[in-house]
Image: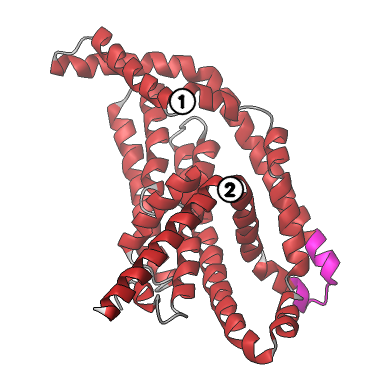
Amino acid sequence: MKFQGLGVVKAAAWATLLVCMTLIFKTLGFLFVPFFISLLLCYALGIPMEILQRLKVPSSLRIIIVVFFILTVLYLIGNMVSLNIKEFYLQLPEFEKKFWDYAAYLLKWFNISPDQAREMYDSVIKSFKQVDLQPIGSMVQRLSGSFFSFFGNMFWVILIMVFMLAERESITQRLVEGLGPKNAGPALEVIGRINKAVQSYLGLKTLISLLTGVLVTVALVLFDVPFALLWGVLAFLLNFIPNIGSLIAVLPPVAITLFQFGSFGKAALVALILVLIQMVVGNILEPKVMGRGLNLSPLVVLLSLVFWGWMWGIAGMLLSVPLTAALKIAFEQLDSTRAVAILMSAKK
């Protein structure tokens, strides 16, 4: 009975710690989100930093080169996407009119009048407003602002990333000096495993997502679909969100194709091509390139997507897989949590 009581107390302590950590991460999301995004950028930039190091480029110059490259890419892509979003917002009323025309045609089959459909639509929008969400039109309008406002929001991310890159090479030495060689060994081993796993995942995932974005853009250009670059960038970004990201990326260009050309056949063909791209890249190429990857169970990936999405929104969805993988590696180091790490692992 004594041991059973100790087990209950231990479980209660872990549950309390989990609730407290969840509240802290939720409340201080405005601090943790830019920190973790900066950390992921550092992982993604690890390979070019190592290449520059092999070329004997000084540390400070390496950081300047890498940061300048990131800022240039962000500016060029962001500026092009911003122009596409502005044009899309200008045409949004026309797309909305066509949407209701198609909706009226389809609703006839269910004996639903357009007025009833609009009433249902208004009730849905009203429910979104009650949870502090914006209708799509407002969101697009907000996103269509100058890219410089986005650049301003990225200031803290870039600043934190610069300091992390500057500290990247000296952190190991300071850990050894602070903890001692004996105590620092296990900590450095865990950090090394996390670094290797996350950096490999991000590097390969970025290349695969880039390939997906390029293929989607080319396919949409060939079909003369409006805003092809915007949908290609969207496919690139959403490919980082597991399970549902690739599905969401298919829907907007297919809807725009239908509204623009009024052809169900062409919309279906575009949908087929985009689904084939996602299936070939995501289900055939990606497993071969990434192998076992982070060794996370698909169910754990889905639950982490839901949890981190609830925690921090879209940013949480983008961060969900690397954060969960880091937690799994950390759990493997403790006897009390090793069973949790095994449950999180994919089938060997």
Q: SS for tag 2? A: loop
Residue 10 in picture, x, y percent from top left: 37, 71
Q: Amino acid at mark 1?
A: Ile
Residue 235 in picture, x, y percent from top left: 47, 45
Name the residue at 37% across, 16% down.
Answer: 98
Quadrant assignment, res 99: top left
Name the residue at 61% across, 54% down.
Answer: 37
Residue 110 in picture, x, y percent from top left: 14, 18
Answer above or below: position of 218 versus 334: above
Q: SS for tag 1? A: helix
From the viewer's side, name the closer residue of 218 and 100.
100
Which residues lie in the magenta part? 52-64
Dot 2 surroundings within 10 Å: few (below 14), some, or many (20 or more)? few
| Location of mark 1 (residue) | 136
Q: In the image, which disc is placed on residue 28? A: 2
Q: Amino acid at mark 2?
A: Leu
Is 40 part of what is drawn in magenta? Answer: no
Residue 173 in picture, x, y percent from top left: 75, 82
Secondary structure of the magenta portion, mostly? helix
Is 53 part of what is drawn in magenta? Answer: yes
